[in-house]
Image (cartoon, helix red, strand yellow):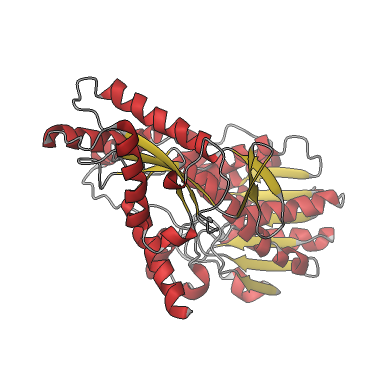
Amino acid sequence: MVDRKVKKVNARRKYRAQRHIFTGEFVDINYLNANPSLAIEVKSGGIAYREGNWIQINRHTGEEKIIDPLGQAAESQYHIINLLRRRLPNLTPRPIVGRATWFTSVVLDKKLPLPPSASLSILLDESDLDKPEKGIKKVFTFWKENLGAWKTDIPPTQFIQVINTLMPTFHIAPAISSIIRENSEHYVRMTRQQSAILEFLGEQPNAAIHEPAGTGKTLLAVEKARILSRSGHKTLYLCFNEFLLESLRKAYPNDQYITFHNVRTLGNVILRKDDIPIEKIVATFEEYLDSEYDDNLWPYPNIIVDDLSDTLLEHLPYLMEISGGVFYIFHNRNQAIMKKEPSTWIDEHADCRLVLYRNCRNTSEIAHIISGLVPVQEERYINNIHGNKPKSFVYKNDKELQNIAANFVKDMIKNGLKVEDIAHPSHG
C-alpha cells in the first residue's frame, strides 16, 4: 500500500514536470514535433452525469456543482489553434491540437453509458496517474485517427517558434512598492505587540524607553501621547526632526490635548520670539529655561520627548513634577542627535528604564547589518520580514553623493514608489 502511494506521488510529480500550465489547462509539448498538441481540462473530486450535465462532487462536503469539462477543454483547444494562427501565420504544416478531460480522483468503468460528446479515448482517470505517458498517448492516437494526421513534423526552426509561443519565458520581479504594501501589515501587527509596554507605562510617572533603530519608537511615543489625550490630559510631544514635526501636525490637526513641537518651535513660543537664528535658538532656549523662566507658567503637565540635550532633560522632568503629570523619553543611545555623548540624566535619574528589541520597521536584511554595528540582541531584533539586500555606496565629495542619491530616487520611482515612500518623515 505504501509502495503504491509512493509510486503515485512520483508519477504525479513526473507528470507535472512534463506539462506546461496554460490558461488553467495545460499543453503537453513533448510530442509536439511528431504529434498533435493537447489541451486537457483537469477535474478532481467525485464525478456524476445527470440530466445532460456533468456534476463535480466535493469529496469533503458532498457539495455538488455543474461543470462542463469537455467544453472547457474545447475552449482551450480553439484558443491554442487561434493563437498559433495569429502569431505564426506562415507555419506549415500546422500541428493539430486535440483535447481531453482528466478526472484525477475517480476510476471510469469502461461500460459507462457516456453521452455522445464524450469518449473513453479522451477521458483520463485516477489510474492514468501511475503511467501518464500511456494515457496521453491514448488521447493522441484518438485525435490522429479522427483527424487523419499521422505525421505532422515541422522544421526545427518552426518547432522552436511553436514552443516559444506556447511556453514563453519571462520573469517579473515584485515591485518595491508592492513589497512595501505587503510588509506594512506585518510592521503594524508587530508594533501593536510592542504597544503592550504602554499599559505598563500607565503605572510609571517617569520612564526612559531605549529602542534600537526600527523598533517603533516614534509610533509608540505618539500612541502614548494619544492615550493621554483621550483621557483629557494636556500633553507636549517634543521631537527633534523638522519633517517629523510637520508630519505629526498634519496627521493630528484637531487634537486639542496634544501640542507637537520640536526644540526650535517650542523655544520660539516660550521666548515669544521668532527672529533668533536657528543655529542659536536651542542654546538660547536652554539658558532661558535654566535661569529666567517662571516654571509656574509651564502649560504642559505631561511631556513625551525624543532625543534631547542634558540641559533640557534636567529641567523638563522638574516641570512635570511640579505640574503633577508624567514624563517619558523614548530614545536610542546609538543615535544621540543633539549631542556627542548619551545623556547621563537617564541613568542617574529615570525611575523606570525599559529596553525594546523587537524590530518593527527594518527588514531582516537591514537588521542583520544594524546588529553588526550596534549592540542589540540579534535573536530578538531580526524579524522574518524580508526585502532587497541593502546597497552601500562610496563617494568622495558632496557632488558624488548628490548624484548617487538622485540615481537612487529615479530607480525607486521606476519601481513604483512615491517620493514620500522613499524617505519617511519619521525616519529623519
In this rendering, would 175 be left or right of 195?
left
Nearer to us in this view, 373 or 104: 104
Q: Where's residue 278, x and y in %?
A: 51, 39
Q: Position of residue 135 (x, y in %)?
A: 37, 53
Q: Which of the 4 image quadrants contains residue 227? A: bottom right
Query: Could you tell me which residue is drawn at 48 percent across and 79 percent down?
Result: 1
Q: Residue furthest bottom?
A: 2
Residue at the (62%, 75%) spot, across then down: 348
| Residue in the picture at 63% in, 66% down | 209
Q: Nearer the viewer, residue 418 or 282?
A: 418
Q: Nearer the viewer, residue 74 or 166?
A: 74
Q: Is residue 241 left or right of residue 233?
A: left
Q: Residue at x 42, y 46 (%)?
A: 121
- Which sits in the foreground, 141 or 422? 141
The vertical placement of 335 against 158, above or below, is below
Observer able to see residue 288: no
Q: Position of residue 144 (x, y in %)?
A: 30, 38
x%, y% of residue 188? 62, 53
**Location of residue 32 (image quadrant):** top left
Check the image and report above or below for 25 versus 127. above
Judge from the rendering whether residue 63 lies leftward or rightward of residue 12; answer left or right. Answer: right
Quarter of the image holding residue 77? Answer: top left
Q: Is residue 13 visible to the viewer in this orientation of the structure?
A: yes
